[in-house]
């Protein structure tokens, strides 16, 4: 049975109202009592909002994806990104992402067409049209399904060249998820992405989103910052908070793994880590982040 986007939008609104009325339905993480709560700000009229979100492929503290997907869609609709890079999107997650009202989704699975986790780019289809896109593997053979170096699993990168329907201005959004285990795979993956940007997109604004599985100052981070600017650091208006949180007994206040970066022709306005959840409910072991920028 085909589910319409209008129905999804209505159901999300109803879902949010019911969870607000009945309270928190499940525990999905530990957060300190004095944890700072950061919400979603109104976007300036001339700004472009770039979002990154690791939505967690499996369960979160025993709560399966099937019970978290509507919270994820509600959060995305609250942020209202112009473009969004998602990590850990399984085929089941992709089914729901494709039903976000007002958005289109591009990207292939890391284990072949439609299989395994995706790093899709979700973009505002009313404002932008897709001019070009591709998914490649972070490996020695990027044009086919492959495991890179000594990585723990296949890793991919998806990019989308988006064109403003009204002005004709273009930018490219690059989205990835680095290996969690191999230092070599992280380093070489970062080098591949920087080479792509330098060789193919030198004349167009670039935004990069990722769960890099690497903290600020690490080797892959330094490689990426040789080509792009970390908007968490450069935005004049920002909230700084860790992005990964252990779902068992503690939250690591130094664990920043998720990034929005950009080329020098992108001007950052704000950077936010959204920690408020949806009526006290959280989707993932990562917080969503976004940056408002101008080209």
Image (cartoon, rainbow, N blue to C red):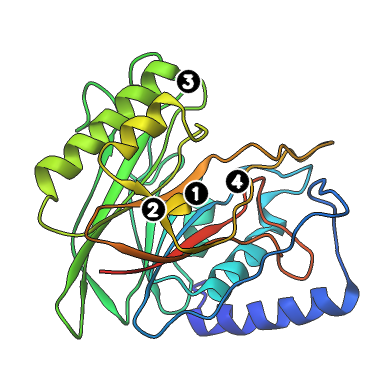
Q: Which residue is mark 3?
A: 152
Which callout, 3 or 4, points at the residue further toward the start of the chain?
A: 4
Displayed quadrant of residue 125: bottom left
Left or right: residue 63 versus residue 76 is right
Q: Residues within 10 Å of mark 2 (few under 14, many from 20)?
A: many
Which callout, 4 or 2, points at the residue further toward the start of the chain?
A: 4
Instruction: Give the Cα separation between the discs numbered 2 and 1.
Output: 7 Å
Left or right: residue 288 versus residue 282 is left
Of 275 and 161, the residue lying toward us: 275
Of 32 and 168, the residue lying toward us: 32
**Residue, x 84% and y 48% (percent of image)?**
32
Q: Which residue is mark 1?
A: 89
Instruction: Give the Cα separation between the discs numbered 3 and 1.
Output: 18 Å
Q: Which residue is mark 4?
A: 56
**Residue, x 79% and y 47% (percent of image)?**
29
Of 165 and 276, the residue lying toward us: 276
Residue 147: x %, y % from top left: 35, 22
Residue 76: x %, y % from top left: 54, 68
Q: Which residue is mark 2?
A: 120
Q: Secondary structure at mark 2?
A: loop
């Amino acid at each position: 049975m085909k589910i319409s986007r209008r129905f999804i939008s209505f159901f999300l609104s109803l879902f949010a109202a019911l969870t607000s009325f009945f309270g928190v339905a499940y525990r999905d993480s530990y957060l300190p009592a004095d944890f700072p709560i950061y919400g979603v700000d109104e976007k300036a009229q001339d700004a472009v909002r770039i979002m990154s979100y690791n939505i967690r492929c499996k369960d979160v503290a025993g709560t399966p994806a099937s019970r978290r997907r509507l919270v994820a869609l509600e959060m995305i609709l609250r942020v209202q990104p112009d473009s969004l890079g998602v990590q850990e999107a399984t085929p089941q997650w992709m089914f729901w992402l494709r039903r976000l009202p007002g958005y289109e989704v591009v990207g292939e699975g890391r284990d072949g067409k439609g299989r395994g986790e995706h790093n899709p780019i979700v973009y505002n289809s009313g404002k932008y049209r897709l001019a070009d896109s591709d998914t490649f593997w972070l490996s020695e053979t990027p044009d086919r399904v492959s495991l890179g170096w000594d990585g723990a699993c296949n890793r991919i990168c998806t990019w989308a060249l988006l064109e403003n329907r009204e002005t004709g201005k273009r930018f490219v959004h690059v989205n990835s998820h680095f290996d969690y285990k191999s230092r070599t795979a992280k380093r070489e993956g970062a080098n591949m992405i920087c080479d792509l940007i330098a060789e193919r997109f030198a004349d167009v604004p670039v935004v990069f989103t990722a769960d890099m599985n690497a903290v600020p100052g690490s080797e892959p981070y330094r490689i990426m910052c040789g080509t792009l600017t970390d908007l968490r650091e450069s935005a004049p208006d920002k909230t700084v908070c860790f992005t990964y949180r252990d779902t068992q007994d503690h939250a690591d206040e130094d664990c920043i793994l998720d990034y929005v970066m950009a080329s020098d022709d992108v001007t950052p306005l704000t950077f936010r880590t959204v920690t408020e959840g949806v009526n006290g409910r959280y989707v993932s072991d990562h917080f969503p982040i976004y940056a408002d920028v101008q080209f």
